[in-house]
């Protein structure tokens, strides 16, 4: 199948307008903004991408932000940092500082996720040794 990124950006824009007008959950709107930011990056439009990532981060840091998929925050931070990096020398000092901060926050998120994964693996190993339950059942219980 052929990807039509400009059309995706247009449709995401329409969807965002409707979702914002009808007061849909901000965490869901943030996800759409992040996806559209990714599409703008694919179209080599980092200024538009940076705006969408920034708005997504604003929503994720506000009310309902805690309901978002745990991957949205790091993805939005990394996206904004990459968008600013793509601006090159046209990035303002403020944008450059924000990008550095976004990278730092992104790596903190990732290190926490990795630490949680290691803790989960240790718990899985302990449970597997003390039980005859299949691995799939253990995974289902932990979720």
Image (cartoon, rainbow, N blue to C red):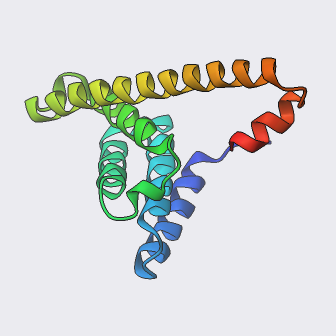
Image quarter hosting the C terminus = top right
Q: Quadrant of residue 119?
A: top right
Q: Nearer the viewer, residue 20 or 89?
A: 20
Q: Is residue 128 left or right of residue 53?
A: right
- Residue at horizontal 42%, vertical 21%? 111
* Rendering coords of residue 2 (x, y %): 74, 42
Q: Nearer the viewer, residue 95 or 77?
A: 77
* Rendering coords of residue 96 (x, y %): 17, 28
Furthest residue toward bottom: 22
Residue 2 appears in the figure: no
Furthest residue toward front: 130
Is 50 located above or below residue 121 in the figure?
A: below
Q: How many marks?
A: 0
Residue 76 appears in the figure: yes
Q: Quadrant of residue 59?
A: bottom left
Q: Nearer the viewer, residue 88 or 34?
A: 34
* Rendering coords of residue 71 (x, y %): 51, 40
Q: Nearer the viewer, residue 124 or 33?
A: 124
Q: Is residue 128 left or right of residue 36?
A: right
* Rendering coords of residue 118 (x, y %): 56, 19
- Residue at horizontal 51%, vertical 22%? 114
- Residue at horizontal 35%, vertical 36%? 77
Image quarter hosting the N terminus = top right
């Amino acid at each position: 199948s052929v990807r039509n990124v400009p059309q995706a950006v247009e449709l995401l824009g329409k969807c965002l307008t409707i979702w914002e007008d009808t007061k849909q959950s901000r965490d869901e709107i943030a996800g759409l903004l992040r996806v559209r930011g990714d599409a703008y990056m694919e179209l080599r439009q980092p200024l538009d991408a940076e705006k969408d990532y920034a708005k997504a981060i604003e929503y994720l840091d506000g009310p309902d932000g805690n309901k978002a998929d745990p991957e949205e925050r790091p993805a939005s931070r990394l996206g904004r940092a990459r968008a600013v990096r793509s601006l090159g020398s046209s990035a303002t000092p403020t944008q450059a500082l924000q990008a550095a901060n976004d990278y730092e926050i992104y790596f903190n998120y990732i290190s926490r996720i990795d630490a949680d994964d290691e803790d989960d693996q240790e718990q899985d190993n302990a449970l597997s040794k003390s039980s005859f339950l299949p691995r799939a059942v253990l995974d289902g219980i932990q979720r």
